[in-house]
Amino acid sequence: MPTWKEHLPSSIAGAITIAQFVSCFFISAGEIEILRWLGWLIWIISVTFGWLPMVQLKRYGRVADGKAYVHTSQLVRCGLYGIVRHPQYTALPLLNISLMLITQHWLIILLGIPPILLMIPDLCKADNEGLAKFGDEYRAYAEQVPKVNFVIGLWRWMKRRLAKQHNP
C-alpha cells in the first residue's frame, strides 16, 4: 500500500496545475497568435491523453468487473498506448505547456514548470511497476513505444502500421 509520501509529488503537481488553470481566468490571452493556436492544439491533445486511456484500459486491459480501469491484467499496446506508454502522465505536462502558450504570461509560465518536473518520479515508478507486473513483455513494449514523447511515438506507430500493411 503506497504511503502519503509517495503521492506527495503528484499531489503537489496537481495542486499547482489547478492554481495555474484558475489563474488563466484572470489573465488575458497572449498576443502572439501562432503560440495561442499551438497552445489550443496541445490542450486538445492533453485532454485526449487524459481521458481516452480510461476507456482503452478498461476495454483492452482485461479489468475485472467492479475494478477501476487501472487494474489491468493484460498489457495494453493499442490506441494511445501504441503511441506512448504513459498517456495520462503525458497529459499533465501538455496541459501545463498549453496554458503557458495560450496566455504567454510570466505567472502561468512559472506555475507550469514545477508540475512538469514533479511528474518525473511518477513516470519512473510507472515503468518499474509495468516491469514488475508484465516482465519481459513490458520490456519489449518499452523498446518500441516511448515513455511520453508522442511525436516520436506517433512516428514509430505509423512505421509499424506501414510495415504490417507491406508484410501481412
Image (tube, rainbow, N blue to C red):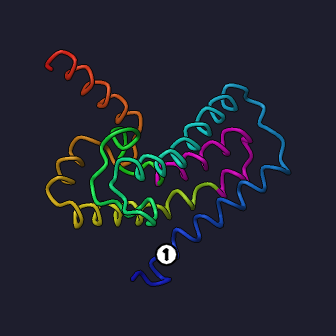
Q: Would you name the residue on which mark 1 appears?
A: 7
**Membership of 90 in magenta stretch:** yes
In the image: residue 167, left or right of residue 114: left
Front residue of 1/68: it is: 68
**Which SS class for mark 1?**
helix
Name the residue: 41% across, 61% down: 70
Residue 104, image quadrant = top right
**Which segment did they paint magenta?**
89-111
Name the outermost residue toward the front: 65
Instruction: Say which quarter of the image contains residue 159.
Output: top left
Residue at left offset 67%, top offset 25%? 34
Q: Residue at x 51, y 71 (%)?
A: 9
Vertical arrangement, residue 99 with respect to residue 121, above or below: above
Dominant secondary structure, magenta? helix
Q: Residues within 10 Å of mark 1 (few under 14, many from 20)?
A: few
List x then y, in percent, for residue 76: 31, 48
Which residue does the image show at 31% across and 44% down from the upper left?
A: 146
Specify the amino acid type for callout 1: His
Percent coordinates x, y for residue 14 in the rendering: 60, 64
Image spot of residue 164 (x, y percent):
20, 23
The C terminus lies in quadrant: top left
Work out whether 130 lies above or below 109: below
- Residue 68 highlighted magenta (yes or no): no
98, above or below 113, in the image: above
Instruction: For the N terminus, give its image quadrant.
Output: bottom left
| Horizontal side, residue 59 vs residue 144: left or right | right
